[in-house]
Image (spheres, helix red, strand yellow):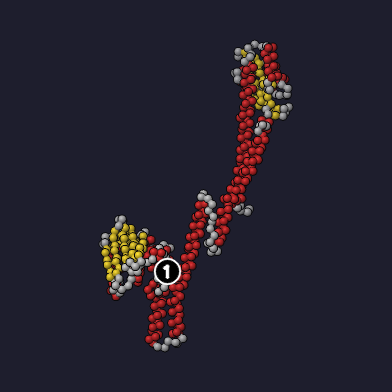
Amino acid sequence: MFPMKLNQKIWLIVSFGIIFTLLTTYSLTQYLYERLYVHDVETSLSYQGKKIAAEYKGGSLSPSFQQLVKKLDNLLQARILVTENPSELGACLPFDVDYNSLITANEREQLLAGRTVTKTGYEKRFDRQIMAVIVPLLDGKRLAGVVYMYLPLATITEAFSEVRYILLIAGTIFVGLSLYIGRQIVSRLTRPLQQMEHIAQQMAVGNFKEKMKVTSRDEIGNLSLAFNHMSAALEEVDHKRREFLANVSHELRTPLSYIKGYSEAMVEGIVVDEAQRLKYLQLIHRESGRMQCLVHDLLDLAQLEGESYPLQRMPLPVAQLIEDTLEHYKPILRDKHILLAVDINPDPVVNADENRLEQVIHNIMDNAIRHVGEGSHISVRLEEAKQTAVLTISDNGPGIPPEEVKRLGERFYRVDKARNRKNGGSGLGLSIVKQIVYLHGGQFTIKSVEGKGTDIIISLPLYEV
């Protein structure tokens, strides 16, 4: 069995809807026939029969009463028979009928109780249903006779003859409109899905240019908007992936070239002087160290972004960690004549991984020292604010242009377009900082003014006992 397409399924639903509507209309017509026409005939016959029975005054059926019945038989549409002996009723009818089926013993009891009996049955002579009403003629408690009135019922086609053509025209218009509207609905519902299928195939081969046309604000329109957002996100991810590969290649190309060039010079015997040979070995060692740091940072960032790195959280006095970490930088700061100002609140305690938080401080301090000149100053401030510990590391360096600030923290992104490895680092430090802060449930903010300096602000939730 072949799988059905969505438009075929919807067409099937529409077809079932039309069939259901037609069946419902037919059932409604039958109901109206039974409820209105047949019920109306029964009510009319019962009323006329009771009016005739009301003329009976008791005793035997007088000639005047029988004459009245005969006169009414000629005037009314229904046939009227009156007899003193119900058993002779079958002989009075102009068609064959079984007496036992005409009036049963139970129905005779109803007649004796003064109740009217209504009967419906098919009669071959008329080729249609016959409705009969039997009204008792009571003389005290004795059944003196019956008034029998019957009328062939019109068929449903005859009953609705006046509106038959109207119903036919209305039915034709309904079916035509249903098919047209159904086709429009199917087309409207499936067109965006077909477009999505086409665009998804284009996205699979790396083409993210085509977008969905949003023509409505319903669920399909919202799905189209979500699809466009997904396409844009995938395009950005693809762009970042290409940029990442290009950056990794760029970062590795130069050290690999150095290592290859220096090692080839040594292998081929070009370097004969021992001092020069030692210099080449130091260069090879330096470049391999940079490659090692780069690979280590990449692995760190991959683990942190995948949230696969297990954080060893513990209640941690942040002030003590900052003071211990800054001790490593005092010789460097002294050599570069950089003034360090420290204002630390000793109270804040956070639930954090000590090694990862130390890495955050190291990365920010490295960036700050790298970008300020001799005679500059760096300030480190820790304070409590709204159930958070706020660490601010500021410098009075050259600052960062506003359009660059929002991109800081992207992998391999440097404000220094010259990409000077001596002064620029790998461009992964702030990416790692952002991810570590995120995993601790904190916030990472950069504020910078060109010519005045930069503030790196980290907010971490306080430890709750």
**Res. 398 image quadrant:** bottom left
- Residue at 28% x, 70% y is 339
Q: Amino acid at mark 1?
A: Phe
The reply to whether residue 355 is in sight is no
Q: Residue at x 29, y 62 (%)?
A: 382
Residue 316 in the image: state x and y as whole percent. 30, 62
Q: Position of residue 16 (x, y in %)?
A: 61, 44
The x, y position of residue 394, in whole percent, is 32, 66
Depicted 10 relative to depicted 34: above or below = below
Q: Quadrant of residue 118?
A: top right
The C terminus lies in quadrant: bottom left
Position above or below: 153 against 309: above
Q: Name the residue rendered at 40%, 65% in the picture.
A: 404
Front-most of residues 163 and 259: 163
Q: Residues within 10 Å of mark 1 (few under 14, many from 20)?
A: many
Which residue in the protein does label 1 denote?
A: 412
Quadrant in which residue 78 is drawn: top right
Q: Is residue 295 visible?
A: yes
Q: Residue at x 47, y 70 (%)?
A: 246
Side of 254 relative to 340 (left or right): right
